[in-house]
Image (cartoon, coloured by chain):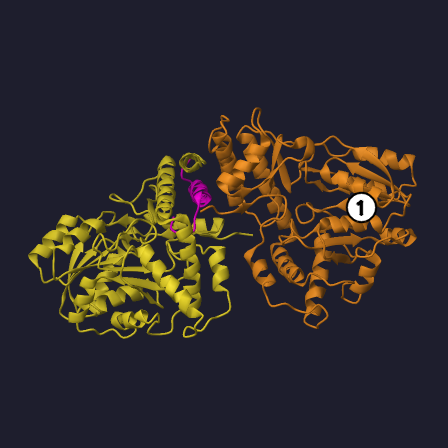
Chain colours: A orange, B yellow
Amino acid sequence: MLKRYLLAPGPTPVPPEVLLAMARPMVHHRAPEFDPIFQEVREGLKWLYQTRNDVLILASSGTGGMEGAVSNFLSPGDKALVVNGGKFGERWGKLCKTFGAQVTELKVEWGRSVDPQQVAEALKKDPAIKAVYVQASETSTGVSHDVKALGQIVKGCPETILVVDAITALGVFDLKTDDWGLDVVITGSQKALMLPPGLAFVSVSDKAWQSADKAKNTAFYFNFKRERENQTKNQTAYTPAVSMIIGLQEVIKMMKAEGLDQVFARQTQMAHALREGAKAAGLTIFAKDMPSDAVTAINAPEGVDGQAIYKSLRVKYGITAAGGQDQLKGKVFRISTMGYLDRFDIITALAAMEMVLKGLGHPITLGSGVARAQALLMAE
Amino acid sequence: MLKRYLLAPGPTPVPPEVLLAMARPMVHHRAPEFDPIFQEVREGLKWLYQTRNDVLILASSGTGGMEGAVSNFLSPGDKALVVNGGKFGERWGKLCKTFGAQVTELKVEWGRSVDPQQVAEALKKDPAIKAVYVQASETSTGVSHDVKALGQIVKGCPETILVVDAITALGVFDLKTDDWGLDVVITGSQKALMLPPGLAFVSVSDKAWQSADKAKNTAFYFNFKRERENQTKNQTAYTPAVSMIIGLQEVIKMMKAEGLDQVFARQTQMAHALREGAKAAGLTIFAKDMPSDAVTAINAPEGVDGQAIYKSLRVKYGITAAGGQDQLKGKVFRISTMGYLDRFDIITALAAMEMVLKGLGHPITLGSGVARAQALLMAE
């Protein structure tokens, strides 16, 4: 018997209350029963996003939201600035090119956060850049970019919008969509929102809507204007993922009951305990700047294959974490602390990590990382 | 947000597969769809009980099975020998008295196993004793009684049957119902069988049926003969707890897939790691003889209230363990390792125990017990 533990950066564990809500009999999305549910979810998303604008709800994975954040705002030939510090930064570049944009890539060393000054200089050099694309949390490296600082910079550029992939950020740490001037913010259901994969969410600022008005829109399924028109009638353009939205209603109830500040504090506490525990066990964290509280990339110790760590966690201990991608393959393993996790999940992650490393012949003191996390996670 | 961890000696965690099975649409218990389910469950119980006899299935808690094991075999005035080494031994005495039996109590110091020789002597002294009542695992003290040795003794007494409360034993450690001569063996659904509370199970040997034939039976709901008659027609005398039986079908599938020896080995490994971890953290185990692998009573350290430990586990850490009962109140806390638990539940229990004790001002080295358990629970 091997219990399964989900500590990968999405999908994350779904709380039983949410699973039960999603198992309720199907409701028709044009029937009156769906109205108050959808209304409540729309209001809840504004609260979660800290925005006065509507948050579009799409039946897709997060990448669908990213695609729409390109196709609705850029016309072929438009200029885009892409911050690329990992696999998901790279994806922004691919998307922009797919839709015919002229892409300037601001390459950031993996493990580092972008220097906001570099973005400011690029925009100064070319004020015709229509949009800056960035991750709030780069899942492949476990690093955050300072989107608050970027918001300040882009606010001063009348022709440019800031598009933030917050897929592993929203609901993990503070993101003040309106106050920070984040024009387009995308997230997905299967991360901090504790739902299965299947929903993407996108907020759009007034400035971004004006930009969209000027663009030659090539989007059909991910057509943001059409979604907005429908949403003002408390509808979606196409069939919504009904049970997911019912699950989201439950998630928002849970998050409201806990309070947004408390959610952020818990997520920070978990990630901090994991990082400090790993360090106490003699390991090092891959992030050189601003580690993301969503996911921690831990360097495989000298002489140990990171993929072997990740595989042993899964096969021997039932724990699904993640390995490294591309240039990090074999060099790191990644543990997510997003969403429905509490302190004993962190203890489990560290205990298993120690057992795996010892099993792979690495000299590690069992309990050393756990003890540090215990001290940090003690209740008052 | 506080996740809930169930580490009390019943109810124990129910596996998701079983919860899902129990959530299937209701089946009528006299409809043909129920036939193969009930047949499979009956066969599965024989396998689990290691018996050729039918195992009766009652819609009640374990105590219902205990009551029937008195009322079906003892007439008013009949003599019973009760082994009383804890709260559940005491319950045998109360039940026997309720049904008018003449009770001889063999009092065993809490924390000790009964000396089988004492039972042999009592039976020698009074061969008219109709039944010996004992626990295979005394939940209040975390101690096992040697029912294999008792079976040997009672086999030699033609007028006496051995009645075993195996409520926290069956499915935890080896109990060879037929081979060991355990005439009546009772268990409940909410322990090692990983189901919610609501079902009791009772096996009855040929010798016990003969004894029942001679008794002035006062049972109506817990009438074993009536249940047996119905069970030969693949029925129950009264309405069975249908969804529980569907859940049991799933449980038996899971246990068969794991294998009975492997189930016992895992349960022993978990209990052993918990005991050794507690000792490595400087604590002591209450059991002086044969500790039960179902539940471990750990002595509260000098100057720390056992009830405070149990309460702090629940309130601060979301862990439902158990306190001490009666004379042990405040002196021990109890952690169950029965059923659907794996190594990280043991790690969680020990980590939380250390954090609670440190929080209560007891000098304990965080991680000390966890490290010992990690070493014992490492996968090959």
Label 1 sits on a secondary structure element that is strand
Amino acid type indicated by mark 1: Val
Residue A167 percent across, percent down from the top left = 70, 47
Residue B227 image-quadrant placement: bottom left
Residue A39 percent across, percent down from the top left = 72, 65
> Label 1: how many residues lie within 10 Å, few (<14), some (14-19) or many (20+)?
many
**Magenta segment range?**
B337-365
Depth check: give the residue in front, A128 or A224: A224
Residue B140 percent across, percent down from the top left = 30, 53
Query: Where does the C terminus of chain B fall, quadrant-wise?
Result: top left
Specify the subunit that label 1 lies on.
A
The extreme top residue here reads A302
Q: Residue at x 62, y 52 (%)?
A: A194
Q: Is residue A240 above or below residue A340?
A: below
Depth check: give the residue in front, B169 or B331: B169
Indicate left or right for B39 with A140 as reference.
left
Q: Residue at x 74, y 48 (%)?
A: A63
Q: Which residue is mark 1?
A: A163
Q: Is residue B109 visible?
A: no
Q: Is residue A120 magenta?
A: no
Q: Is residue B40 visible?
A: yes
Q: Is residue B358 magenta?
A: yes
The extreme left residue here reads B125
Residue B234 percent across, percent down from the top left = 35, 70
Q: Residue at x 59, y 33 (%)?
A: A307
Indicate left or right for A134 with B214 as reference.
right
